[in-house]
Image (cartoon, rainbow, N blue to C red):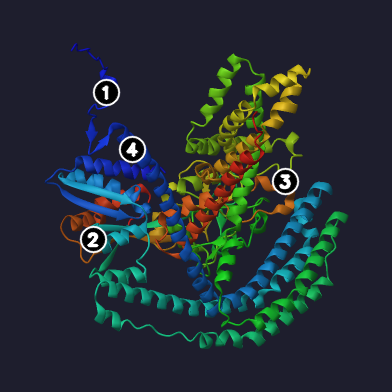
Amino acid sequence: MTETKHHVPAGFSLHKRRLKLLGLTVEDCIKAFFGGNAIVAVVVLALVTYFLFREGAGFIGQNRLNLQVYRQAGLEHVDFIRRQSEDHTALTRYLSDLRLRALSHQTNERRLPVEEAQASLAGFDEFAERFGAAVEPLRSLVTDLTEIATASKTKSMVNEDKKEERRQLLAADKTAAAAKVEIARIDFAAELQPLRAALPIYREVNREFSGKLTGLLGALPALPSADLQQRIERFAGLVRTYLASFPAVERNVERWDSSVPVSAMEAFTAFAFGRQWLTASFWQDWYGVLPLLVGSLLVSTVALALAVPFGVGAAIYANQIATKREQKIIKPAIEFIAAFPSVVLGFFGIAVLGQLLRTLSEQPWLAWVPGFPFSERLNVLTAGCLLALIAVPTIFTLAEDALNNVPQAMKEASFALGASRLQTTLRIIVPASLSGIISAVLLGLGRVFGETMVVLLCAGNRIAIPDFSQGLAVLVEPVHTMTGIIAQEMGEVVRGSIHYRALFMVGLVLFVVTLLLNCAAQHIVRRYRIAVG
Amino acid sequence: MQNIRFIFAAIAVAAVTSTASAQRLVIKGSDTLGAKLVPTLAEEYKAKHPGVSFEIAAEGSTTGIAAIIDGTAQIGMSSRRAKPTEVSAATAKGVTLKPIIVAFDGMAVIVNAKNPLTKLTLRQVEQIFTGDVTDWSAIGGRPGKISVYTRNTSSGTYSDWKELAMKKRDYAKSSQKMAGNEQIAAEVAKNPNGIGYVGLAYIQAEGVKVVAIDGVVPSQETVLGKKYAYARPTFYYTNGEPSGEAARFVEFTLSEVGQKIVGKIGFVPTK
């Protein structure tokens, strides 16, 4: 028997002993490592989402209690009348604005010396004085009622503190001491008796007040120019509307019932459609997300309006028109912007851009731009410009990818039919990649919407819905944003308090909006992608 | 921001210098005190008592009082008195909260240096910050829309100001919430129509001007003499009578040397 020597290379041995770790081969280990990472990522994301919902969910119940106390303690009742007195304050502001215009008319157009100009407005001043004084009885009534309502609210807050104390004692196993904590029952109906008793006084005050205002309407002062005269007519109209609102206020006050329970739905709508975000108030806290949402939307809109032309334009140029050498410069340069930490951009905004924009707005030859000149250097425009800088790299990179994905055959076919380079780009390539470009814009929007540092530093942090009636000038108003408020207030808020939970609710809104944007982007790409081949 | 960086630096320094045998003093709480005053006092104290190390964390008055209740700090800094729930929480855990006034913090109303206004009344300040008045001309100034700058809502100063100057009413909706004293001073310095409030330590900022309130200019004398309206006490909180190193540090703070530092940093000494 001749032995033929089988030479089997070691690598192909079917029975080679493999290195095993805990019964796993190296490949298994690598597989397990990557699989494990993926699972951990998914689990962590799920936990974050769960945590967000869990911390936010308690808000509805707490806000319900918050509003319940607002009603039971009679604060709501007082606020009806308070609003009436505040509307009057707004009217007096209109009057003082009018006086300013009249004075500048007298000194600038008619060139009267200041003393004479002041003297010529004596009639107006007397009218304004009487108009301002008319509200005094109503205002002092509001002050009295405020005290009553505050007293009953304080009682209920002391009660809450006592309950907390009892809970703390029980937690420390001091049952005997806990039993000693007395929690007085508050008889809100009795507490509110003085409020109700004030109703006839309120009616009386109101009648007198409206009598005075009607009297004043008959004695409008004459003003030196047609324009001013028109303004005082407009003022009279406003006063008439104001007077017409009295019966409704009175009805509200009469019909007001402290025992109507606050529903969970009301507690939710107070958040979702609330126009006030007012915290740490001695009177009443409000958690309405609208001013913050509007702020976020305004800033993002400005950012997108600037970033889309630049981002998409640069992508088209880099992908279709630029030479290889230009491409080598443009692409890294734009992607480099993304390397700036947003806090650096924020400081740049405070130190340079805000000041620059304001100086620009004060140039006389730019006075035609709506909103110019403006005095607040931290506003929607400043923040929007910087956010655009953040959005451009995202939009550029993704849009460029989309343009790249258009099959070469389409381009060649277009050239073959005799289309020029520009025609091919604008009529074939861009429309073919439109879905990708739109999704790039949406993802850029998501990036901008969630950006925090820049808006916190540069948006001006005014928690109010800006006045849209002034048109485009709204873009130079300061606003506060959802991301900004979380960053600003989360630091010192008491854990588990209603304020804490309200901030989580804002976080939830952010989460939902960003999620929707991402879903929409993915959907558009999938739905409208051109089938290749 | 700067404050936070400073605190981290202070903690780092404290950590490095601590030795195994060293006495360790943990101080937590208010940003107002912990940003500059207490670290400076600690440095001075360390120079005299080598071997003592400090851990200072300034994350707000709430954390300071909570730290005393939990026993995680020997001294809690606070710019306000303890709330009833905090007192009861302390009692439940067998802790007595003892406040010690270490300094007064005067708040100055500042306007832009170009603003011709030099004085305001208490009532006018209230009207401006609550938004009753929105134009400078209404209080005898140069016409222009008033820009109100305040601290952010979670800061203790934000609600203290409401109590001191605004009869507990709410801020004007148009007010802008700034991150800190420096930012308020910076915005007022750049905006001819701006107004805001800052601690006395910040009134030297360029481009701003302090306004006299009812004829009184804020200063150490007027605050101490209770002539100036906008001032508040700041506290150390301890668990009962302080003892050991904590007692000595409290004593040092209240001593002549300590109070001199208090004045130098921009607070008002207690005597």
Question: Residue, x 75% and y 64% (percent of image)?
Answer: A125
- Give A90 or B92, whichever is nearer the viewer: B92
User: Which amino acid does the dot numbered 1 rest on?
Assistant: Ser
Q: How far apart in space, not on screen, are marks 2 and 4 (Cα)?
A: 43 Å
Q: Position of residue A447 (x, y in %)?
A: 55, 41
Res. A472 mark? 3
Q: Earlier in the sequence, mark 4 or mark 3?
A: 4
Res. A13 mark? 1
User: Which amino acid does the dot numbered 4 rest on?
Assistant: Phe
Residue A223 makes an appearance in the image: yes
B59 sits left or right of A300 in the view? left
> Secondary structure under badge 2?
loop
User: Dot 4 surroundings within 10 Å: few (below 14), some, or many (20 or more)?
Assistant: few
Q: Chain of mark 4?
A: A
User: Which amino acid does the dot numbered 3 rest on?
Assistant: Leu
User: Dot 3 surroundings within 10 Å: few (below 14), some, or many (20 or more)?
Assistant: few
